[in-house]
Amino acid sequence: MLVYDFKNIGKVYDLTNNDSVEPKHAERIAELSDSILAGFKYDKYKNLKPYRNESLRTMTELIRLSQIPTDDEFSYKMDKVRDSYKKLCKELDVKFPEKMVKELKNSASGVVLDLKYHFNRPRPYKLAPLLNIELDTNKIEDTTSDSPSYPSGHATQGILISNYMAHKYPQHKREFLKLGRDIAKSRVIAKVHYQTDVDLGISIGNDMFNYLKQNKLI
């Protein structure tokens, strides 16, 4: 039952994810100026605000999350982005471009973390209890689930790397693009992101790839 009254409206309205920027995240943001995405213009995304905590749309997102069947095996499998692509390369018998994947992953992380702290949207599992919505969120380890929610870093990284790998190995385009979509989808199944976090992450990942390709950086 959804409870939304004057007892919790203040907490819902004021809730953020972080009181300050985590040092490890600040370091990654600072590294962006020397990365392959240093020239990528992303200020436009700062105008794409997430739904407010107290909005009906956010409540609807949370209710939909609560209704999604959990799949811990799938969520854990997709959690480690680099390892997922390394495994697929082995299955397809193609060389895993370790250095480039690491560069893409870290650079995308810098952009996303800067946006995350700009919006400071609380993760679903922080907001849901205030609205009496139960989320059976699993405990994904080795992830950035301690960072703000919007946009999804995994979705951004997954889509960016999948586009790069499909570009590098066009004969396996279908497999790589599917992996990128699965990584993005897994964040909603794990219930560590709202669907709108993932949607924006997908858009940013595609835009990053187009930027790198147009500027002949890949």
Image (spheres, rainbow, N blue to C red):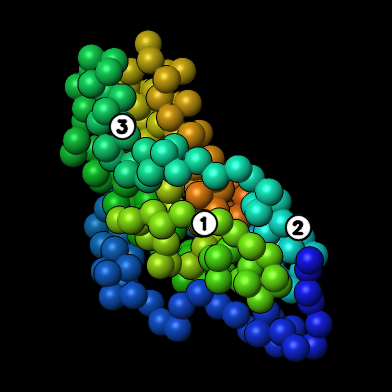
Q: Which residue is mark 1?
A: 137
Q: Are marks 3 and 1 in contact (CB under 8 Å)?
A: no
Name the amino acid type tagged 2: Thr
Foreground tag (2 vs 1): 1
Estimate the spatial distance between the alpha carbons at disc 2 and disc 1, rounded to whole Å.
17 Å
Estimate the spatial distance between the alpha carbons at disc 3 and disc 1, rounded to whole Å.
25 Å
In terms of sequence position, does the residue under pointer 2 or pointer 1 come before the other?
2
Q: Residue drawn at (21%, 27%), measured in percent from left and top?
A: 96
Mark 3 neighbour density, 10 Å: few (under 14) some (14–19) many (20 or more): many
Q: Nearer the viewer, residue 149 or 209?
A: 149
Q: Please give the label number shown on residue 60.
A: 2
Mark 2 neighbour density, 10 Å: few (under 14) some (14–19) many (20 or more): few
Q: Which residue is mark 3?
A: 85
Mark 1 neighbour density, 10 Å: few (under 14) some (14–19) many (20 or more): some
In terms of sequence position, does the residue under pointer 3 or pointer 2 come before the other?
2
Foreground tag (3 vs 1): 1
Q: Secondary structure at mark 2?
A: helix
Image spot of residue 18 (x, y percent) = 46, 78
Asked if one can make out residue 187 in the rendered structure from this viewpoint, the answer is yes
Q: Are marks 3 and 2 in contact (CB under 8 Å)?
A: no
Q: Nearer the viewer, residue 78 or 130?
A: 130
In the picture, the quarter occupied by the N terminus is: bottom right
Q: Secondary structure at mark 3?
A: helix
Asked if one can make out residue 184 in the rendered structure from this viewpoint, the answer is no
In terms of sequence position, does the residue under pointer 3 or pointer 1 come before the other?
3
